[in-house]
């Protein structure tokens, strides 16, 4: 787990040499299925604090059987320091040098619209024996690859490939 957190932090801070970058670890943690998977995610504006939050559902879907019925568990993660600018309809964080770093944008009508991550933002979900930590990383320049990255504390091929290629666009046959 420490290696995964170190990797996420390194990927963000290595980009900071070129531009503004931030990393925010949610103070909220969840305890879910050790070998479950993320099946759904949504960003929303937490009205009480005016902060960006993520609601994420995990499921035991990979090992459902006649003896083990399917169960889904939703959890909320708040990202302190990310604020909504209603004039721009966007969420921003303040970088190390005082620059505004775009995090997400409100799309559609405020009452029934949706929020999606900015091109430079990614959310890492690090699972250690079912304990989930959410880390939001963002830069003020676009980054390719997945925006929602789930990593377990095992050294599966999937986790190794995500760690190696999440920042690069790799094509299978050249």
Image (cartoon, rainbow, N blue to C red):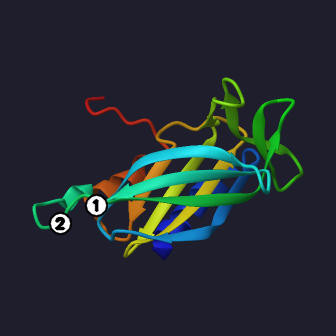
Name the spot of residue 48 as percent of width and height, x first. 78, 56
Q: Which mark is residue 60?
A: 1
Q: Tag 2: Cα neighbours inside 10 Å, few (<14), some, or many (≥20)?
A: few
Residue 163 visible from this viewpoint: no
Is residue 52 left or right of 159 when viewed as pictured?
right
Q: Is residue 29 above or below residue 60?
A: below
Q: Residue at x 52, y 36 (%)?
A: 144
Residue 25 visible from this viewpoint: yes
Q: Is residue 136 above or below residue 172?
A: below
Name the spot of residue 72 as percent of width and height, x first. 36, 57
Q: Secondary structure at mark 1?
A: loop
The residue that disc 2 covers is 68
Q: Which mark is residue 23?
A: none
Q: Secondary structure at mark 2?
A: loop
Image label count: 2
Give the alpha-carbon distance from disc 1 to disc 2, as whole Å: 9 Å
Query: In which quadrant is the N terminus drawn?
Result: bottom left
Q: Mark 1 and mark 2 in contact? Answer it, CB < 8 Å.
A: yes
Name the spot of residue 139 as percent of width and height, x first. 69, 45
User: Residue 80: which quarter of the image?
Assistant: bottom right
User: Residue 136: which quarter of the image?
Assistant: bottom right
Q: Residue at x 49, y 46 (%)?
A: 41
Q: Tag 1: Cα neighbours inside 10 Å, few (<14), some, or many (≥20)?
A: many
Query: In which quadrant is the C terminus drawn?
Result: top left
């Amino acid at each position: 787990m420490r290696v995964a957190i170190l990797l996420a932090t390194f990927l963000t801070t290595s980009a900071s040499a070129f531009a503004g970058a931030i990393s925010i670890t949610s103070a909220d943690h969840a305890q879910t299925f050790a070998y479950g998977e993320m099946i759904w995610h949504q960003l929303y504006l937490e009205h009480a604090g005016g902060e960006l939050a993520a609601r994420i559902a995990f499921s035991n879907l990979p090992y459902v059987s006649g003896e083990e019925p399917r169960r889904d568990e939703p959890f909320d993660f708040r990202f302190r320091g990310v604020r909504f600018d209603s004039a721009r309809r966007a969420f921003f964080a303040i970088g190390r040098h005082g620059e505004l770093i775009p995090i997400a944008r409100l799309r559609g009508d405020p009452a029934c619209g949706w929020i999606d991550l900015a091109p430079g933002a990614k959310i890492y979900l690090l699972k250690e024996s079912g304990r989930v930590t959410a880390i939001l990383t963002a830069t003020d320049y676009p980054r390719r690859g997945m925006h929602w990255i789930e990593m377990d504390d095992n050294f599966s091929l999937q986790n190794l490939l995500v760690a190696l290629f999440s920042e690069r666009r790799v094509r299978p046959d050249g």
